[in-house]
Image (spheres, rainbow, N blue to C red):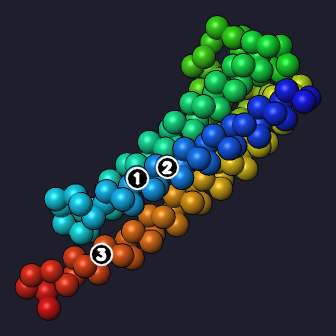
């Protein structure tokens, strides 16, 4: 159980720091993009999506490690089936839910932590996107010929 708890904390810290850096870099470079203010939302959404994708891959590695080290498992998966761990990670991260694969033993802790972490990071990206829209869309309306 200590290994699963340690891995869970480590993955939360890594994914939060990753997401922080994605949002920070996006913020730092957004104003410099040679596109209209309104179109700047597109790179925001793409950056958030890429951040979530990397977070899902990181958690898939976590499930693989628990299985490989024999501290936990997911029904129907072996350490050789990484794409199944990726699928399980996506369904857990998004809180879509799982039914065809179930976490067993200490993997249950990681699945619960991932669902909470995914919910928080999805909320963070939604609020970041909203703030970017609030900032850049009015600039578009004040552009040439609009007032």
- Tag 1 residue: 25
User: How far apart in space, not on screen, are marks 1 and 3 (Cα)?
Assistant: 20 Å
The residue furthest bottom is 147
- Tag 2 residue: 21
> Could you say whether the residue bearing mark 1 is in a helix, strand or loop?
helix
Q: Give residue 138's position: percent from left, percent from top.
A: 29, 81
| Dots 2, 1 in contact, CB < 8 A | yes
> Could you say whether the residue bearing mark 3 is in a helix, strand or loop?
helix
Q: Give residue 12's position: percent from left, percent from top.
A: 69, 43
| Label disc, if present, on residue 128 of the rendered structure | none
Residue 126 appearing in the image: yes
Mark 1 or 3, nearer chain start: 1
User: How far apart in space, not on screen, are marks 2 and 1 (Cα)?
Assistant: 6 Å
- The residue drawn where x is 69% and y is 48% is 117
The residue furthest right is 1
Left or right of 131? Residue 58 is right
- The residue drawn where x is 14% and y is 91% is 147
Left or right of 13? Residue 21 is left
Which class describes the residues within 10 Å of circle 3: few (<14), some (14-19), or many (20+)? some
Using the image, determine if residue 104 lies above or below residue 23.
Answer: above
User: How far apart in space, not on screen, are marks 2 and 3 (Cα)?
Assistant: 24 Å
- Closer to the eye: label 2 or 3: 2
Using the image, determine if residue 58 lies above or below residue 74.
Answer: below
- Tag 3 residue: 137
Which class describes the residues within 10 Å of circle 1: few (<14), some (14-19), or many (20+)? few
Image quarter (top left, top right, bottom left or bottom right) of the N terminus:
top right
């Amino acid at each position: 159980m200590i290994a699963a708890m340690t891995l869970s904390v480590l993955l939360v810290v890594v994914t939060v720091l990753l997401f922080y850096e994605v949002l920070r870099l996006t913020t730092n470079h957004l104003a410099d993009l040679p596109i209209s203010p309104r179109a700047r939302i597109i790179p925001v959404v793409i950056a958030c999506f890429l951040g979530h994708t990397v977070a899902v891959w990181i958690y898939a590695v976590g499930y693989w490690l628990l299985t490989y080290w024999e501290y936990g498992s997911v029904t129907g998966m072996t350490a050789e089936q990484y794409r199944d761990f990726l699928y399980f990670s996506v369904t857990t991260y998004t809180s879509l839910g799982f039914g065809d694969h179930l976490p067993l033993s200490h993997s249950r802790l990681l699945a619960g932590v991932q669902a909470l972490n995914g919910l928080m990071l999805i909320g963070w990206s939604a609020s970041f996107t909203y703030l970017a829209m609030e900032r850049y869309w009015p600039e578009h309306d004040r552009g040439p010929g609009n007032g």
